[in-house]
Amino acid sequence: MATFHSFCYQILNEHNENPKDIIDDHHRGILIAEALAYVRKKGCRVSLKPKQILNCIIAAKQQILDPDEFEKVNTADTHKKTISDIYRTYQNMLSIQNLYDYEDLIFHVVRQFETDPKFCKKYQKQFQHVFVDEFQDLNQAQYRIIRALAPGKNTVKDLCVIGDPDQAIYGFRGSDVKYFNRFISDYPDTGVINLVRNYRSTKTILNASFQVIKNHRQPTSDDRTYSQINGTKTISIMELATDKAEAQTIAGIIEQQIGGTGFHSVDTGKVIDANNAMSRSFSDFAVLYRTNEQHRVMEQVFERAGIPFQIASRETALNQKGLPEIISLLKAIEGLGGYLDYENINRLVMVGIGKKTLDTFKDWCYRNRLTFSHGLLKAARFPIPGLKPSRQQILNDFSRQLSQYKENMSCLSVADKLLYLEKNTKLLGMLNSDASIKEAFARLVEISVDFGIDLTDFFSSIALHTDTDAYAQQAEKVSLMTMHAAKGLEFPVVFITGCEDDLIPFKRGNSGQADIEEERRLFYVAMTRARDRLYLTRAKKRRIYGKLEDRVFSPFVADIENRLKKDDTPRLKKRRRRDPDRFNLNCFNTGCELCVASCVLGVVGFGLLVSGCVLRVTGCELRIAGCELRVASCVLRVAGCGLREEGVARVGILYI
């Protein structure tokens, strides 16, 4: 069982004596920028941004077009001609450094399947039964792998695919629901089974989510799902003043439903009645959002409220300060990785290699088609043009340092190698200064245990790690994650935050464009993650790129019938008018203690009635002006305080 990308990486490694490393999106973006710079040095004028160029290259690879083929199919487009030059340079950089990017994995396997019949036949025999989940999210290249493994005639009995066209949410990665229809034509003897019963969500949640997509369904979606699970008759709608108020309200609801986060939850009114709290745990709750930026306010509020949470995000799990550096160092020790890995290492081991030295060395390696590790070996024997002997000596010292690390860790498992580097680099100081880094590193070590001594598989797993992979199912914490990351998961209680136009549907970049139908399906997916309760929240004002903006409700929410929605926005209750000459301070139980510490207790123009209690006022200033203080069968203890009495009538026993 594997994802398409990990499956293809396994196949490629079976035929490579020296397995290639996989770069992540961050590394890929830097390489694209470098390729662009090289093309510009040749005198080519490029007005496109690196992100636009990268998207074109990704699309080309998903269509299995190499740089020359991409140029041929775009001969009339001068921009595409320039992109093909950058694409060619980028691929050359990957090749020199012995690297793959994400799309290369499938690209190379498809090419091999379609050009080498013997190679393809081998894997047809090896995989005689093929099952494909989430079929609606396939792109062209992935579908071509299915066609290669199960070409059609006499193979349909060995091929099973399952998917829901209403949950197609990866169009931005090239996926296309058309492969549902194409599958039927490519495999005409296919038997189709419609699975229409939902065993997860209540009737209300399914009815509400269906109304979002019912007039916008894919042609292949004829039947609707149903549920026999009864539950709350409405979903909750909440409109809050700001994004912070939104987060505070969600935190309050969670605290109410679990019965409080501390001993004083009832005393402070955060929980009205602990006996009526639902039997929920923190892991029963998920907070979903459209963009990663939205979790920051939620994170701050939950920390202050004492609510444990996990952020299901690759960025949070693997990109904490120190983690990319230690992974890069481990790659360098093993003779893997690219030039960016060596730049990262500078932060962990003080090698003294400046940017100018590294750039000169890197250019020399590119010209001689050397990986960084091979370049270091050559640098020990040959002078590098443009590099002073003292600078080159630093490179040689660094090479010896890597060799020493490798010798010291030669018999260790992946987990033990990480722990060794923790203690022998600057990472230990980083861990001790930041609890979140410490937790992320512990999680990395935990992941590495499964790989034993297999560094190649460990590195590929880290490179292919997704947001969903960062979700720890056993953690007793509230889950914060994007709507995309929630795909395939389920929770008893789900909050979908930021239900506002421009966020849901999300409009990308300055163009303000959105794939409305895909955004609608994404909202449907998010809603159907909930089993029992679903809350849709929005802020009337939200800070976007530092600017506070007015917000309006998402149009998708308006598609849900009013009978299925309930306005549960918290509102301040009107206070009853009190007698201005009398104020009763009642404790929860007769005979309890009312403690007031380090504050100013001001009672002005009221009657303060304390009955059967101990009123302790410590380190405070107690001001009683023009009041009637009635203390019946009580002890009023005022320690270390200033007591001011102006026009006060006292009745009862008073100890000071």
Image (spheres, grey):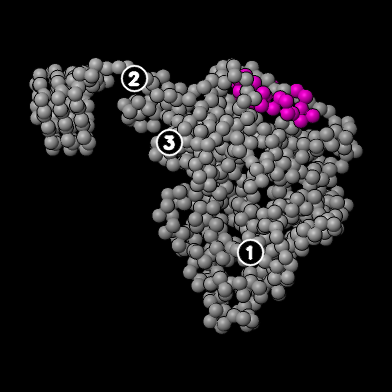
Check disc 2 and report the residue beneath it.
Answer: 575
Q: Are marks 3 and 1 in contact (CB under 8 Å)?
A: no
Whole-percent x and y of residue 338?
63, 64
Which residue range is magenta in the image?
195-223
> Which sits in the foreground, 271 or 558?
558
**Tag of residue 338:** 1
**Quarter where residue 380 is shown:** bottom right
Residue in the image at 53% along x and 81% along y: 390
Report crowding for label 1: few under 14, some 14 to 19, many 20 or more residues within 10 A (C-alpha).
many
Packing grade of label 3 (10 A; few <14, some 14-19, many >=20) is: some
382 over 308 or under it: above or below: below
Is 509 placed left or right of 480 in the picture? Answer: right
Q: What number is the disc on residue 307? A: 3
* Nearest to the observer: residue 604 or residue 251: 604
Pointer 1 or 2: first along the chain: 1
Main secondary structure type of the part rendered in magenta? loop
Residue type pointed to by label 1: Gly
Q: Nearer the viewer, residue 553 or 305?
A: 553
